[in-house]
Structures are given as C-alpha cells and as structure tokens.
Image: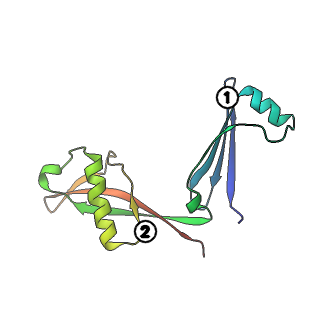
Amino acid sequence: MNINGKITILINRENTHIELYDQDSLITFVRIALTPEQLSSALSRLAYTPCTMEVHGLDKLGKRQEMKTLEFRLPRERMGSGDHKELNTIAQNILDEENEGWAAEDYFSSQNTFFCKDELPYARCTCRRWVDKK
C-alpha cells in the first residue's frame, strides 16, 4: 500500500520526536520518541536502533476522511450543561440510527456548540468517518 504521507522531525536537547502523517485520512499514525543517544545511533547508520513508538489508526490508513456537522435537539435542562460525555452519547445515538460509520467528536466547547432554533435548545458537533479512496 502506498500512502500519501508527510513526516515531521522535531529535534531538541532532551529528545527527538518523529511523526508520520497520512494526508488522505488526516491522521498521525506513528509517533516515535528518541533519546539523544538513540538519535545519534540512528544517524550513525546503526540498524535497528531501539526506540519508543506509538502506533494507532492503522485501520484508517489509505482511506479518505469525510466530515460533516450534526445538529441535534437537547432537552431544555441540558442546555449548556457541559457534560460532554452525555452530549457525545446523544450525538452518537443519533448517528447510529441515521448514518453508517460516522463517529461524533467528543468536543462541545466551541463558540457555536450550543444554540437555539425556534426557541428550542440545540447542540452541534463535527462527525467523521473514513471511506475507501475512489
């Protein structure tokens, strides 16, 4: 599989961080941390230098990320409650009923998250899914 990727290498006195990013799925899927000694070994062409590596999102590699905004009505007493877990559960239940594969972000703190429409309380969140590239 070929990935349309980018790499970031940040070097300082204490450590070096390397990140691998997939431009299509919009995720960083590998984060590598190196001590100064490990960096020196790797740059000296020492094969298989030990390091700390965090890998995630491999199921999304090579796919394209889609985003949409979901607006949903809230019970009046929940308006601006700040209970992000409950709001995320409400949003995910709506998504599960109506849309296959979408996941709601658990972020309800931006300026436009809570609003009123026809004098009823609503919330808004971003939803994402990853689909095969065409």
What residue type is disc 1 on? Answer: Asn
Total number of numbered labels? 2
In the picture, the disc for residue 15 is: 1
According to the picture, the residue beneath numbered tag 2 turns out to be: 101
Across and down, in percent, residue 129 comes to: 47, 64
Q: Are the two marked residues, 2 and 1, in contact with CB atoms closer than 8 angstroms?
A: no
The residue at 36%/50% (across/down) is: 106
On the picture, is 83 further left or further right than 69? left
Coloration of the structure image: rainbow
Residue, x 12% and y 54% (percent of image)?
76
> Sequence-wise, which precedes: disc 2 or disc 1?
1
Q: CA distance from mark 2 to mark 1?
A: 38 Å
The answer to which of 88 and 42 lies nearer the viewer is: 42
Q: Quadrant of the C terminus?
A: bottom right
Q: Where the N terminus falls, by quadrant?
A: bottom right
Return the residue nearer the eye: 121 or 127: 127
Q: Vertical placement of 131 versus 105: above or below?
A: below
Q: Position of residue 125 (x, y in %)?
A: 34, 56
In the figure, 5 relative to 66: above or below? above
Please name the residue shown 74% across and 26% down the image. 36
